[in-house]
Image (cartoon, rainbow, N blue to C red):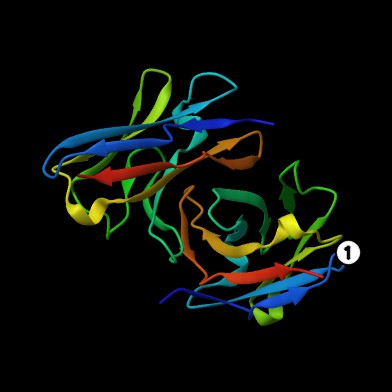
């Protein structure tokens, strides 16, 4: 089964920019993997941020953007706010099933 | 608005089965698929499977394939996830979420805590 890999943790300063990535064990992530990105804070369900690589939900702050970067999916936060400290998960579509990445714990310090 | 409301927490003994329900409202149930996702305490999200609410087609993660059954009752606009042969490692919050048909996965239910303990 596909393994999806994310950075375990990243630290960014308030106002800074950070990019989280999402890699697949099957090879390069393309738009056909329909990458989704979710934010999760302790005790809460995941909150959808990005779908189909780069599409935003109506509630997604403008500072969040999704893309393909090399052979990975990427989530970039520009102008990071303290409230962006959270766990971030990517979700890929592969062979008829979905697979979550291991999550990236983003610290804003 | 679209809402997914899940059943209450459950405590089960090892070897038992659990069925979690996900009652939907605010949209045409049969048009979309429902995903099931779980999260053990302090652990990552795990995708378990999904069902197209209209066609009834299901697809499961290889990890859960032998123990999970996802079903739906179209008359009640409700999806179900049943997990059998429970073990302590199945202690987790179980979520349902709607597939938007455009690869989006939203909204999510509030989660159902399942505790497996002797």
Q: Residues within 10 Å of mark 1 (few under 14, many from 20)?
A: some
Q: Is residue A73 left or right of residue B116?
A: left
Q: Which of these two is toward me, A36 or A82?
A: A82
Task: Identify the residue at horizontal 51%, vertical 72% (top origin).
Answer: B110
Counting from the top left corner in percent of width and height, residue B33 is at 60, 59
Please tell me in which quadrant of the rendered image residue B82 appears. bottom right
Return the chain for callout 1. Answer: B
Task: Identify the residue at horizontal 52%, vertical 70% (top origin).
Answer: B109
Name the secondary structure under disc 1.
Answer: loop
Q: Is residue B49 left or right of residue B67?
A: left
Residue highlighted by disc 1: B15
Q: Is residue B14 left or right of residue B49?
A: right
Query: For the C terminus of chain A, which image quadrant?
Result: top left
Q: Against A78, is A62 above or below?
A: below
Looking at the image, the residue that sits furthest to the front is B118
Q: Against B94, is A92 above or below?
A: above
Task: Identify the residue at horizontal 38%, vertical 37% (top origin).
Answer: A9
Counting from the top left corner in percent of width and height, residue A62 is at 18, 49
Q: Which of these two is toward me, A54 or B32?
A: A54
Q: Which of these two is toward me, B88 or A69?
A: B88
Q: Is residue A91 left or right of residue B6?
A: left
Query: For the N terminus of chain A, which image quadrant?
Result: top right
Counting from the top left corner in percent of width and height, residue B60 is at 73, 48
Counting from the top left corner in percent of width and height, residue A46 is at 44, 58
Please tell me in which quadrant of the rendered image residue A31 appears. top left
Task: Identify the residue at horizontal 16%, vertical 40% (top origin).
Answer: A13
């Amino acid at each position: 089964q596909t393994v999806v890999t994310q950075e375990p943790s990243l630290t960014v300063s308030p106002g800074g920019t950070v990019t989280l990535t999402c890699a697949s064990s099957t090879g390069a992530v393309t738009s056909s993997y329909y990458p989704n990105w979710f934010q999760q804070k302790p005790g809460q369900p995941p909150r959808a941020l990005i779908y189909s690589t780069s599409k935003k939900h109506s509630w997604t702050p403008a500072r969040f953007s999704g893309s393909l970067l090399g052979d990975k999916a990427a989530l970039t936060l520009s102008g990071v706010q303290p409230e962006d400290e959270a766990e971030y998960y990517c979700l890929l579509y592969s062979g008829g099933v979905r697979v979550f990445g291991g999550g990236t714990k983003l610290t804003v310090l | 608005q679209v809402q997914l409301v899940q059943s209450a927490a459950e405590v089960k003994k090892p070897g038992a089965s659990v069925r979690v329900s996900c009652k939907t409202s605010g949209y045409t149930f049969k048009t979309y698929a429902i995903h099931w996702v779980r999260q053990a305490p302090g652990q990552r999200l795990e995708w378990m499977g999904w069902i197209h609410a209209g066609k009834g087609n299901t697809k499961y993660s290889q990890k859960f394939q032998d123990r999970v059954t996802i079903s739906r009752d179209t008359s009640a606009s409700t999806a179900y996830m049943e997990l059998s042969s429970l073990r302590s490692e199945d202690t987790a919050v179980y979520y349902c979420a709607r597939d938007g048909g455009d690869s989006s996965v939203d909204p999510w239910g509030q989660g159902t805590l399942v505790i497996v303990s002797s």
